[in-house]
Image (spheres, grey):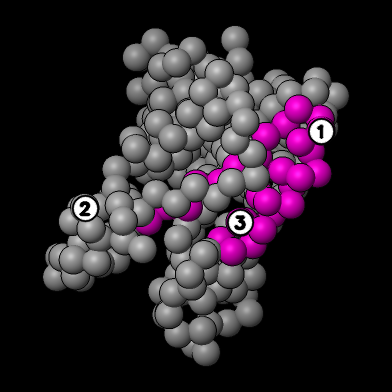
Amino acid sequence: MKNTVITGSSRGIGKAVAEEFAKNGYHVVINASKSADELEETRKEFVNKGYSCSAVLADVSDYGQCQRLFEAEPDVLINNAGISHIGLFTDMTPAEWKRLIDINLLSAFNCSHIALKSMIRNHRGRIINISSIWGERGASCEVVYSASKGGINSFTKALAKEVGLSGIRVNAISCGVIDTKMNACFNEEEKAALCDEISLARFGKAEEIAKLAYFLAEDSLSGYVNGQIITVDGGMY
């Protein structure tokens, strides 16, 4: 049975990705940093559906804690953990932007560094980073978030070049507006305004991101796709 590690997967996109892999026969390692109850609920839900699943509570911005996720050698790593922050850059504190960079970018460094040890030895593996359209275009009042996702995109492209000869593919999914709790900060009027900017006139679904992640993981489906930032935004840009 193949193994996949999905960070930040007790809910939202991460949970949807974990379920997509689990129902396709993978053992999934799900993760959260603080929400232990929610993580355990997700694990029980998956087990009750007959999926092979284990749950690890760990702060993936901490290298030492990340190692708990890799007791078994991973075939696929999904770097999904992330947080957002909306507000003026000039109102942010160094502590706030450090937390954002640590969770959104440093966590991907940590987990990839650990996962690559066995991937390089085995000459196979896939790393999929969950990014954002703001990493490509930038967003006012989300300056540090945009910078963190821009870093993910550059990390993806560079790492793909470095480890491709070892049989490892690295890609990223650049998400548009996806219907998750991360968008709970918007009221209905603001959500409607966002929909007006999207040619499909709706938010994306976490399950749609999950299916693309599975496609990118399977060599039989995407074996020649490497170093790509694939935008999924419903035609917003």
The answer for how far apart the CA atoms under marks 2 and 3 are is 25 Å
Dot in front, 3 or 1? 1
Classify 58 as above or below 196. above
Q: Are marks 3 and 1 in contact (CB under 8 Å)?
A: no
Q: Main secondary structure of the magenta part?
A: helix
Q: Which residue is mark 3?
A: 153
| Range shown magenta | 149-176
Q: Quadrant of residue 97?
A: bottom right
Q: Check disc 1 and give the amino acid type.
A: Leu
Q: Could you tell me which residue is drawn at 64 percent across and 62 percent down?
A: 151
Q: Could you tell me which residue is drawn at 69 percent across and 27 percent down?
A: 125
From this viewpoint, is residue 47 visible? no
Q: Check disc 2 and give the amino acid type.
A: Leu
Q: Which residue is mark 1?
A: 165
In the rendering, at what x and y percent does residue 169 appear? 67, 34
Is residue 35 part of the magenta span, yes or no?
no
Q: Quadrant of residue 113?
A: top right
Q: Check disc 3 and give the amino acid type.
A: Asn
Mark 1 closeness class: few <14, some 14–19, many ≥20 residues within 10 Å: few
Of mark 2 and mark 3, the one earlier in the sequence is 3
Q: Are marks 2 and 3 in contact (CB under 8 Å)?
A: no
From this viewpoint, is residue 20 visible? yes
Disc assigned to residue 200: 2
Relative depth, front residue between 198 and 149: 198
Is residue 158 part of the magenta span, yes or no?
yes
Classify 154 as above or below 63. below
Mark 2 closeness class: few <14, some 14–19, many ≥20 residues within 10 Å: few
Numbered disc 2: secondary structure? loop
Of mark 3 and mark 1, the one earlier in the sequence is 3
